[in-house]
Image: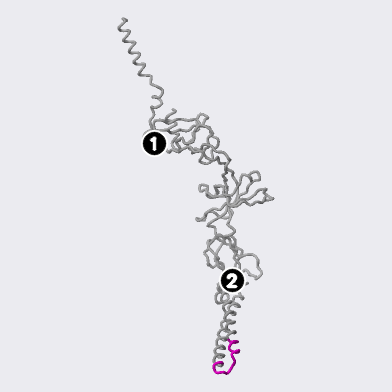
Amino acid sequence: MNIKNYIQASILLIALASCNSKPVEEVNNAFSLSDEMAAQLEFKEAKLENVKNEIRLFGKIDADNNRIAEVNSIVSGVVKSINVGLGDYVKQGQVLAVIQSSEVASFQKEKLDAVNDVAIAEKNLQVAQDLFEGKLNSEKDLILAKNELAKAKTELARINDIHSIYRLKDGSTYNILAPFNGFIINKDITINDQIKSDRSEPLFFIADIKEIWAIANVNESDIAKIKTNYDVTINTLAFPDHPYEGKIEKIYSVIDPETKSMKIRVRIPNFDFRLKPQMNCTVNVRYDEGNKMVAVPAEAVIFDKNRYWTMVFKDKYHIETREVEVYKSLNDISYLSSGVKEGEKVISKGGLMIYNTLND
């Protein structure tokens, strides 16, 4: 090979080498996030937050005892009909049962007598007034007649109040009425029962369960971690995909000698009446550990090659695969002890797709 050809060949090899070797930055910046791909992603800013922990407690759903009514009978008698059953929803004023009672007949007689006494007193007053005007009796007799009428009217008003309060009807039957809207949670009455005046057990219990309680047991070892107003999530076996959110409303500062535990109470809205008294439930209590860490959505953390990663987004040309150290994950939040700084933006949804694209 002559000198000229050798020089030309050397120049060609150098040119080819320079074409095949690009700067590191240029290779790293070769990826560009398209608008179509970006539309499938979600981004969240890493924030410094209080680290929360969780305790799982077990308990039961219970009716608010301030919204439970005991329904009794004010009269003795025999049960003639029962119109509701256990678990039925009833409205205020609805007839629950009917009792045949001689006492009701006595109330009716008292009212009739009171009405007659008023009528007689009015006539006597009119006669006394006429006699007084004709100077045939004294003013004392007139005042006495007025007093008798006032007394008769007072007694009639008292009896009318009794009839109004207990909604007594004409005849010898007494209707047991619902005091408010709610569900029959206990029933202790059957047809032809003899209801006695000294009976102490209620005939019905009615509970208004638009709001309901979750009562949970706290082990002694966890008592120090529990405080009022802590956030809780309540789950039931009946509705596992429908968690209920609430706060600790009350702490019962006594230890049950049988279970060696303390009880807490959470109030839950229950307008759809899904939750029933005596349902089993779990109560997950969230509390602060007392320290702060960078928090990102749990979905932003990717586990691969026995390590944790997250995709840190700067712009569509600069997306970094960053190794992170996960301190704890709770529900949908991961707390990071290293790897991401407060204020950095991470891909919270679709990060795995970008991770695979950049790291294949």
The residue at the far left in this view is 4
Q: How is the image coloured?
A: one colour
On screen, residue 205 above or below 345: below
Is residue 49 in sight in this rendering? yes
Residue 313: % across, % down: 43, 33
Q: Are marks 1 and 2 in contact (CB under 8 Å)?
A: no
Mark 2 highlights which residue?
99
Res 17 → quadrant:
top left
The residue at the far right in this view is 257
Within 10 Å of the Cα at label 2, are there few (<14), some (14-19), or many (20+) other Cα atoms?
A: many
Residue 205: % across, % down: 59, 62
On screen, residue 58 above or below 32: below
Pick the quarter of the image with the N terminus.
top left
Nearer the viewer's eye, disc 1 or disc 2? 1
The numbered disc on residue 38 is 1
Specify the segment rendered in magenta. Answer: 132-145
- Give the mark nearest the N terminus, 1 or 2: 1
- Secondary structure under tag 2 reads strand
Q: Is residue 280 left or right of residue 355?
A: right
Q: Between residues 318 and 163, which one lies in front from this camera angle? A: 318
Residue 97: % across, % down: 57, 68
Amino acid type of the residue that numbered disc 1 sits on in the rendered structure: Ala
Amino acid type of the residue that numbered disc 2 sits on in the rendered structure: Ile
Dominant SS in magenta: helix
Q: Is residue 344 magenta?
A: no
Res 202 → quadrant:
bottom right
Is residue 298 in sight in this rendering? no
Pick the quarter of the image with the C terminus.
top left
Within 10 Å of the Cα at label 1, are there few (<14), some (14-19), or many (20+) other Cα atoms?
A: few
Q: CA distance from mark 1 to mark 2?
A: 73 Å
Residue 144: % across, % down: 60, 87
- Secondary structure under tag 1 reads helix
